[in-house]
Image (spheres, rainbow, N blue to C red):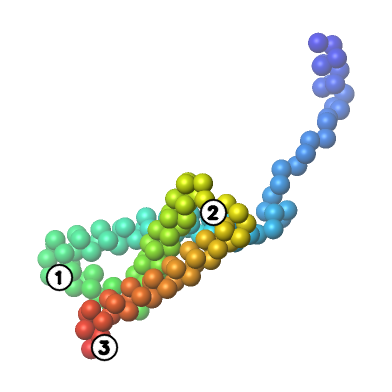
Amino acid sequence: MAELEASTTTGARRARPTSPHLQIYKPMLTMMMSIVHRITGAGLYFGTLLLAWWLIAAASGPNAYANFEWFIGSFIGRLVLFGYTWALLHHMLGGIRHLIWDTGHGFEPNEREMLAVATIVGSVALTILVWIVGYLAMGGPR
């Protein structure tokens, strides 16, 4: 007990290893995809508020729905809707990537990189495809 007190009273401290931080780690694609997956999850939360606004406006009558249509038809509204579409598809593909990992596959370095690239390319391609199909289903240019 006297030894413990002596070491604490003299102020002698052991050198402890420092914890690795972002300045030590080299950013990897899978690490960045993890961060983007979390950001898109948060974006989906706020996008759900947009969906709720749409449903409430539809139930509230023509004036409320006209206000929603005005916003969603504006440049900012379409940009938000495009971002929400991308976030939804990106988050879904990221979930599929994690599902593949849950089966015990895709852990080799080249497989991890391929799945990360497939998530990025797939989300962008599917977003553009969904918007093209939606545009054509709405009658194309008016």
Image quadrant where one finds the N terminus:
top right
Which residue is under mark 2? Answer: 106
Q: Is residue 97 left or right of residue 2?
A: left
> Quadrant of residue 53 in the image?
bottom left
Residue 101 horizontal/vertical position (percent): 50, 50
Disc 2, SS = loop
| Mark-to-mark CA distance, 2 and 1 | 51 Å
Q: Amino acid at mark 3?
A: Pro
Sequence-wise, the earlier of marks 2 and 1 is 1
Residue that appears at 31% across and 58% down: 49
Q: Amino acid at mark 2?
A: Gly
Q: 80 and 94: which one is in front?
A: 94
Residue located beneath label 1 in the image: 63
- From what the image shows, is residue 11 above or below residue 56? above
Q: Residue at x 12, y 66 (%)?
A: 61
Specify the quadrant of the image occupied by residue 65. Answer: bottom left
